[in-house]
Structures are given as C-alpha cells and as structure tokens.
Image: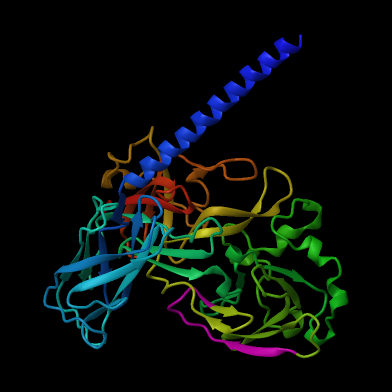
Amino acid sequence: MINKMNMIKLRLNKLLFMGITALLFAACSDDDESSSTPVAINFTNTEASISSANTSSEVSLTFSRPASSDGTLALVLTEGGSLTYGSENDYYTTPEMSDGVLELPFSAGDERVTFSVSAGASLNIEQDITITFELRAPTDALIEVGSNSTLSVTFSENFVATGGTIELNGGGEEFPNQAFIDLGKLTQSTVDKYTWDLGFYTKAGEFYVILNSSATVMARPLDKNDLTAVTAEDTLGFGAEMRVPQYDPSVGAASWIDATDGDLANTAIGEVSSQDSDNKVFIIKRDGDQRNWKKIRVLRNGDNYTLQYADITSTDFSTIEVAKDDNYNFSFIDLDNGAASVEPVKTQWDIMYGYYSVRYSTGGPAIPYGFKDYIIINRNGVSVAMVMNNETSFEEFSTSHVAGLEFNTAINAMGSEWRDGGGPGSAPSLFEDRYFVIADTEGNVFKLKFNRLASTTGERGYPEFTFELVK
C-alpha cells in the first residue's frame, strides 16, 4: 500500500512539474513574442484645425502597447504653407519645434504622447492654409510607424471636418478628465474634473446653479438661510448619507444631485429666488483629495450672482460675485480657488465624455449612481438621434435619412446608451447594433459610431469613435 501511494505521489508530482513547466514556457513564449514585436505608433486623428475661435489643438499619438523603455518620437514638418513659426508669429507648438522637427519624449510604460499646435500672436487667417507633420521612422527596431503617420493642421475660419477618428481622453481607469469634443473643428480639450464645484447659468433673466456631476458633488438643503447659524451639529449623520452611490433610496439622496437630463428646474439647488430670505443654506459634499465639505448660499445680484461660502465649522464666510458671460453656458466656481475655466465657448463643443453621477432608477425610487464612460451633449443647440443598424446601416445613412429621425436635446441623450454593462460584476462592452446622428449648433449633421471601448492596450477611459459629415 505504501509503495502504491508513493507511486501515486510521484505521478502527481511529475504531472504538477510538467504543468508548471508548460505554464512557464507559455509565459516565456508570450514575453518573448511581445518583446520582439515592434510597438506601432499612430496619430489618433490625422486632421486638426486652428481658427480665431479655436486657437489651439491638442494632438495625441498612441502606442499599440505600453513602451518598454524610454525614448523620443520625432515629427517632421513636411509642409509649412506660408506660415511662420513662433509664438509671436503665425503658429507654435508645445513642446517647441526646432529646425522643423518636433521631438516628443516618452517613458517606459507610456501608452501615448501628446502635443499641441496653437495660433501665434500675429496669425491673420485670410485663406485656408495647411501644414503637415509626419512621424519619422524611429531608429529603435522595436518601434515602428503605424498606418496613421501624418497630421494635417488646417488654419481656416470656415473649416468643417468631413470626418475623422477620435480617441476620447478620459484619463484612464479613474476617469480624472472631462473631455470636450467639437466634431466640426476636430478638436478635443480636457479639464481636471476636480477643478470646479458649481456652475452658474449665464442666460439673461434666469438663475440656476449646477453641480459638478463628474466629481460627484452633492448639495443638501438646510432649513436655515444664515451661514453663520450653521454648525457641525447640523450635519450629523450626513457622511453616511451623502455619497455616490447611495443604495438606500429611503435616504432621498437622489435629490442632492442634479437631474440626469439637465433640466435646470430640477437641480439640487433649484432656482435662485429673487427674495433673499427664500434662498437656503446648502451643505456641499465633494470628492477628491483635500476637498473638504462646505456650506454655501447663493443670492441674485442684479442679473448676476453672489455666492456666500465657508467651511462647515467656520463662524464667518467669504463672498464671490459671479458674473454671467453669454459666451459660455455657465460661469464656474471652485470653492477653494474661485473662478475656474471648464467648458469651451458654448458654440465650440458638442459632447463631453467622462465620469458622471446620475439619478438612477430601475422602476422604483431613484438613487445617486456614478457612471464611467458617460457622454453628455451641449445644451446649446446640440441634439442627438440613435439609429439601429437593422433600420439603416452606418455606411448607407445619408442626407435623405435625416428628416425621418427624432432628435433629442436632453443632455443625457447619449449617456451610456452606446455601451453595455460596466457596473458591479459586469464587464463593459460596446453596443454594436447602433450608431448616433448628431446635429451641432451650426447646423452640421454628423453620423458617429464607436470602434472600441478601451485603449488599444485595454485601458478603460480611452474609447474611440469614427464620424462622418452627413450635411
């Protein structure tokens, strides 16, 4: 019996050894293969534009997998038109270009590099002019130029993109960015989502305040209208209740964030009353490092606003006068640093991509819930329609199909409708049975479909879509 048991142990040990050896061999084979396959470098989009309204374009090049070592990419200016380089001349780049070559350093582990092209102080656009950058073939054998190796930057007052491919820059798995896209101008700009808390509506005669839903800012009213009368005792138990997600609908936390569809009459703070005594104190909860809770009160100030704010335990408060600027949808405030630059000019963006907190319901009372990979549209005249492939394919869709669509102007018209899953225990994936048609503020109509949900290396926060001008 002992000999038989020993033989069984020997056989098991042999099988275990063979299994481990096979796994190690497979792992080594995979490593060898990945280390010997060159990293392909591509422009995320091959066109960009500069105008008097859009004075800078940010451009990215992506790696097919993370860089294995430090290095430098070189872009060569192959066509400069009649423009003169320099910040005091017609255009310049960041980082700075030297002798027609733009060098972009990268570090091991990087998945992309980014640079910008900007209008110089002396630029005067009288006719369309295009400059072209080409990615120079690297000397490193483990890096190769991909299929999208050139970038054309058009300086034009009337530029409207006929199409393109854009990788959205949410900043990665943690979604630190809000990314704003202008399809017609082929531009993307990003802002750190923690750089603002409140947005003050700029339309003349209307007084509304929005919360930063990308940073899960919440506002809970108190039955007081004097900031100095509010103490820490007024907020006992708030820490357990004011959070996103809050799965207990009986708490009523959904009312402490703004309406998902962007309805200004249904925000957490509501309309700012013309009667000061009607404007209550709100407790503001903010996510992010060293972003403590605040107490605020908002009043009308002519056609502008007065914001009173303080730490919860403070016996005094500070005041900010918030002016309206009709060039933007909102005037933004950071409760730590004052006025903040967030959205582009309201005529110069179509969609915003990032993280977003919504009032979520599956039929019962709503709860506040945070969505990654969420898209809102510009409330300033942008509208969206969703089209199913079995109705009309993306390739077949043309001008003749536009009239039959039902466009939606709610800011969550796209929302998460372009992808599936992603919640607890659910891996996200693209819906491949649909695409979207977007009408912008200038009357242009684009069709848009998503190609991938993550970066080329699988990191969430970098989806890619293709769009084409329909009319």
* The N terminus sits in image quarter: top right
User: Is residue 361 within the magenta segment?
Assistant: no
When the figure is inspected, residue 281 is found, relative to residue 253, above or below; the finding is: below
The residue lying toward the viewer, choosing from 311 and 455, is 455
Q: Is residue 327 visible?
A: yes
User: Is residue 323 within the magenta segment?
Assistant: yes
Tell me which corner region of the image, top left, top right, bottom left or bottom right, holds residue 159: bottom left
Question: Where's residue 350, x and y in %?
Answer: 41, 62
- Magenta stretch, residue numbers: 317-331
Q: Is residue 409 left or right of residue 37?
A: right
Q: Is residue 269 left or right of residue 398?
A: right
When the figure is inspected, residue 67 is found, relative to residue 17, above or below; the finding is: below
Question: Where's residue 320, x and y in %?
Answer: 62, 88
Tell me which corner region of the image, top left, top right, bottom left or bottom right, holds residue 211: bottom right
Tell me which corner region of the image, top left, top right, bottom left or bottom right, holds residue 397: top left
The residue lying toward the viewer, choosing from 11 and 162, is 11
Question: Where's residue 122, x and y in %?
Answer: 22, 87
Residue shown at 60% from the left, 68% from the top? 212
The residue lying toward the viewer, choosing from 88 and 182, is 88
Residue shown at 34% from the left, 36% from the top? 392
Residue shown at 67% from the left, 75% from the top? 290
Q: Is residue 406 visible?
A: no
When the figure is inspected, residue 415 is found, relative to residue 237, above or below; the finding is: above
Residue shown at 72% from the left, 14% from the top? 5
When the figure is inspected, residue 371 is found, relative to residue 94, above or below; the finding is: above
